Image (cartoon, grey):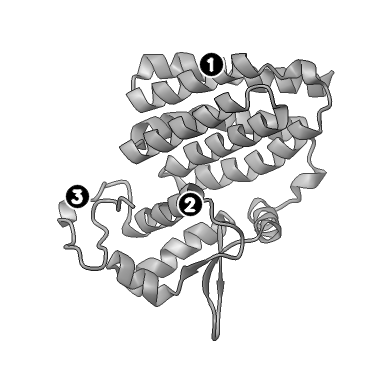
Amino acid sequence: MTQPSGVNVKGAAAAPQTAWSPRASRAATVARTLEQRIVEERLAAGERLGTKTELREEFGVAIATVNEALRLLETQGLVEARPGPGGGVFVAAASARSRLNDLVLGFNLTDTPFYDSLAIRTTLEPLVCREAARYCQPRDAKALRRIVDEMSDAVDDRTAFLGHSAELHSRLAGICANVLLKGLYLTLLGYIEEGILEVESDELFDGPRDLAIHRELVEAIVAGDDQRLELAIDRHLTIAQRWAEAEIG
């Protein structure tokens, strides 16, 4: 697995201090690496990531840095720490994520109209895409294209296609360095994807069209071309607008 610049690995020399992005702290970089591990390896709830000591040794950072990284991940509902024998850091269960997200946002999303959540996510989406384009690395590009290929294989299967779409959006958020943006977006994403699956009208689903929109969005993000990206974002927002209009109607 490719390690971010400035994070040491067992048996490897530490990168120069100047390799660190001025916008990313060591804790944020460790948090992002662990998040990518969860996503790329598709780790299930309850799988163990290691103890704090093991993570400190793996990344070659102070224990305080590990604690801060875990705090960032706990805020997103991605991990949970368990004390005592057999304890350590584990991938959070969905129920734990839901409880934590409710706590972070200050209200229960299940009591919120679907359209309201969709409107906020639509507002955040351009920010996520622009930040993903800014921080996208070769390994991110490879993962994004893999997910789009999986969407292509499921273009005639609405449920499977939407599942891959959710994974793609989650991966885009995972690239972001802005922890608050990432946390809010991922919280809304899970709730909205569940709501979309409950919409019974198959007329809203157009696999080939949505595949082309997502593929162009990914390629624009990978290319880092601002003008191309803005056009791709505008096209991508038409998908959310389609679902919003169905909800209002």
Q: Which residue in the protein does label 1 denote?
A: 212
First-in-chain label (1 vs 2): 2
Q: Position of residue 181 (x, y in %)?
A: 51, 42
* Mark 3 residue element: helix
Q: Which corner quadrant of the image does residue 243 belong to?
A: top right
Q: Position of residue 173 (x, y in %)?
A: 50, 40
> Which residue sits furthest front?
153
* Mark 1 residue element: helix
Q: Which residue in the protein does label 2 denote?
A: 41
- Contact between marks 1 and 2 (CB within 8 A): the answer is no
First-in-chain label (3 vs 2): 3
First-in-chain label (3 vs 1): 3
**In this view, 139 is above or below 100:** above
- Contact between marks 3 and 1 (CB within 8 A): the answer is no
Q: Position of residue 143 (x, y in %)?
A: 43, 38
Badge 1 density bin: few <14, some 14–19, many ≥20, Cα 10 Å:
some
**In this view, 198 is above or below 107:** above
- On residue 19, the disc is 3
Q: Tell whether 221 sits left or right of 78.
A: left
Three-letter code for the amino acid on which mark 1 is drawn? Ala
Three-letter code for the amino acid on which mark 2 is drawn? Glu
Viewer-side residue, 156 vs 59: 156
